[in-house]
Structures are given as structure tokens and as C-alpha cells.
Image: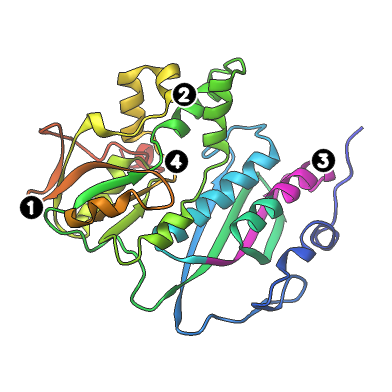
Amino acid sequence: MSTPSLGEFELIRRYFAEASTDASVALGIGDDCALLIPAPDEVMAVSIDTLVEGTHFLPGTAPEHLASRLLGASVSDLAAMGARPAWFTLALTLPEATEAWLEPFATSLIAIANALNIRLVGGDTTRGPLSLSAQVHGFVPVDKALRRQGAAVGDLVCVTGTLGDSRAGLETLLKQEPQSATVDYLQARFNAPTPRLKTGLALRGIATACVDISDGVLADLGHLLNNSALGADLNIDTLPLSPQLLAYAGLKQAQQWALTGGEDFELCFTCPASMQDTLASLPEPVAVIGQISPVPGIRLDGQPVSGAGGYDHFAKESS
């Protein structure tokens, strides 16, 4: 027997109405607009991410995994700016608004939002092919935001965490690999990215430029370099690879996925070489993978890298 669909207002009342409780929210979900109290002496950072079935996730993906992917990816943009999360809005396009889908989605979304200290303050729902969008808002002190522009010759190129795990997790889903500790770890890295908020905040005053890794470290480092008209020399042996990735894929494939796989949502940043000793005191692990060069382009172990090598949503259409 199918679960009956909920109306829009019943959906909001039942699953999302209590999610906006916070001192910074003068009026939350339920009116035509939210009324929000901005932080004094800070600027607002705003970003939006969208997940579309068949493009960003496989049909049949569990709703709780969609919640964690959507919010984790969106808040990662705030981390890349050194911003403190405050609020987010949510847009859901659903084939059917059933309790069987909405209850695990909402439970996961609110739990993750609470863990990240970000409040849901509004949104929209409509009927159609499954897609989800979240717009996030955060705050950063004036002139303290991390930006893609600012790298200088001689700066170190650094990344947080490990790379390639998310792409391997997707591979295990595509191949319907049997569950194991390794497969579970890699799928969790794909389904539930961890935005590096603590490190993003700690990098204020340390990083000269920063970007989150959504399209692959080669592609996203390329965006950072393009903003400063510089290049980078990388050492493939310094790429941080998890034991689980190496066990599943082997060294060569692990390195390839680390460079181009995308959706790791780690931070890639540059900092002066004089700051290298400071990196060990950051709240999350950091690896130095290269150095900024005055020569444009990216070189891997001295060899030029052709093309960005990352994920491009419109590559097929534009080729």
C-alpha cells in the first residue's frame, strides 16, 4: 500500500517548523519571509548547492544520505571562506511528498544542521523530478574572509583530510560492491561529507587563498591559480590517501581519484612557507602537496598536467 502524499503546509509543519529556533532568528519558518538578525561588524557569506537525481546521486539513494550530502557540500563552501555558519534555506522538488521519504530526510537534515550549528529558516517545496537545493548563510569578520585570490610565489599548497575517498565510494555504489568495513567507510565519505569548519576558521590569518575540493584537487587548485595568474608544482607521493582507499583501489588508481575524483569537500589552501610549523596545530590533519610557482600551469612531479582533470557538469554538452 502506498503512503499518502502530504500537502505543502502540512509537510512544513510536521517536519521543519521547529528547525529555526535560534536567538538570531526573529521570525522563522511559516511566514512569507524569515526575519534574521545579522551579526554586527561581520559580512555575510552566501552560497547555494543543488543535487539532481541522475546527475549528483543515483536513483534510489536513501533520503538520509541526500540530507547529509546536500548540507555537507553546501556548508563546505562556508568553511572555504573561513565563515561561521548561521542559517540555510531549503528547496525540495519531489515526485511525491510521502512520510516514508520525508521522515528520514528531515530527521537526518536537522541532526546534521544541529551538529554544524546552522538553522533552517525557510524554503520551498514543489512537485517534479527529485532535486534538492540548499542556500547557506554564514558570517566572517570584515577583511578576514578566505578567498581564491591571494596566493603568492613560494607559498605551500596544502589540503585537509584525505583525497579520493568519495570517488571510490561512488565506484562501490556503481558496482554494487558487497558491504565490508572498507566499502562502508568509502560510501560514508561519499554520502556524508564533513565540512572542515574548524580548520576554515583557524586558517584566518594563515591561508593566503582557499577553495573547497568539489571538482577534484587539480581542477579546484586550477581555479585558485587562475585568480592569481600563477602555477604550482605538486608531488604525487605527498597526496594524502586513506588506508581504505589504497586497499580498495591500489596506489595508481587511488592517486588518480585523489587528483581528479571530486566531491571530497576537503579544503585546498595556500600559506607562506614560514607557516609550515603552524599547520600541525590546526584542528584537522593537513598535508603539504606542493608549492606555488611563477610559471603558469600545474606540474606533477615536474611533468605538466594537461587540462583541469576535474568534474565538469557541462563537459558533455560543450564538447
Q: What amino acid is found at the position of numbered circle 1 in the picture? A: Pro
- What label sits on residue 100 in the rendered view? 3
Which residue is pictured at 70% across the width and 47% down the height?
108
Q: What amino acid is found at the position of numbered circle 2 in the picture? A: Gln
Count every numbered label the image shows and give the total. Answer: 4
- What label sits on residue 263 in the rendered view? 4
User: 128 left or right of 7?
Assistant: left
Q: Is residue 92 magenta?
A: yes
In terms of sequence position, does the residue under pointer 1 or pointer 4 come before the other? Answer: 4
Tell me which segment is drawn in magenta.
85-108
What SS does tag 3 mark?
helix
User: 276 left or right of 74?
Assistant: left
User: 69 left or right of 145?
Assistant: right
Q: CA distance from mark 1 to mark 2?
A: 36 Å
Camera-side residue of 273 and 64: 273
Q: Choose mark 3 or mark 1, whichever is in front.
A: 1
Report which quarter residue 10 is drawn in: bottom right
Residue on which disc 1 sits: 294
Q: Choose mark 2 or mark 3, whichever is in front.
A: 2
- What label sits on residue 170 in the rendered view? none
x and y percent of residue 162 in the render?
Answer: 40, 36
Residue on which disc 2 sits: 244
x and y percent of residue 177 in the render?
Answer: 57, 16
Dot 3 crowding, Cα within 10 Å, few <14, some 14–19, many 20+? few
